[in-house]
Image (spheres, helix red, strand yellow):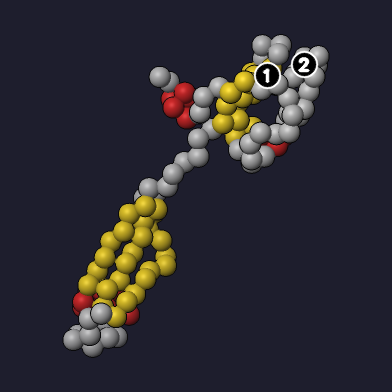
Amino acid sequence: MSEYEDEYGPVIPWSGGECPVDPEDIVTVFFNNNEVSKGLTAGGWCWIGDGTHPYHIIAYRVKKKKVPKVETMVLYGELAAFYYFCDRIAPNDTHKITLTKIDGEWQTEAKLEKL
């Protein structure tokens, strides 16, 4: 299976009507004149047709939406206090901080809890 086939869902036959997917979805459309268009949003196409126009859509595929990879790291105690407040908390306070990384990028927001 090619990278393109992994990236898009199955080919779905189409006989006309209202746009069958979210207008912002990226699609590949197949026309009745054997031409194919890849990588444009669904809202840019005319989905209603009677089959007589050379660019009548007869099938389509939707690009799969990427699911972000989410990771978390939890710091406890003095390390959490130091990270969040630069050591402005008494060493005997117990805290927990949760940091989040989405698609390899640490987020600037952190969740702090006093235990």
Taking the image as shown, residue 42 lies to the left or right of residue 6, namely right
Give percent across and percent down for residue 94: 22, 81
Q: Judge from the rendering whether residue 15 lies leftward or rightward of residue 109; answer left or right.
A: right
| Amino acid type, mark 1 | Ile
Judge left or right: residue 81 versus residue 68.
left
The one of 34 and 106 positioned closer to us in this rendering: 34
Tell me the residue that label 2 is attached to: 51
At label 2, counting other C-alpha atoms closer than 10 Å, the crowd grade (few under 14, some 14-19, many 20 or more) is some
Q: Residue at x 51, y 24 (%)?
A: 10
Indicate the amino acid at tag 2.
Gly
Quadrant housing residue 107: bottom left
Q: Is residue 11 visible?
A: yes
The reply to whether dot 2 and dot 1 touch (C-beta < 8 Å) is: yes
Which residue is painted at 67% across and 14% down in the image?
Answer: 35
Q: Quadrant of the C terminus?
A: bottom left
Question: Considering the numbered disc 2 on the image, is that residue within a helix, a strand or a loop?
Answer: loop
Q: Which residue is mark 1?
A: 58
- Residue beneath the point at 42% across and 47% down: 68
The N terminus sits in image quarter: top left
Q: Spatial distance from mark 2 to mark 1, Cα to Cα?
A: 8 Å
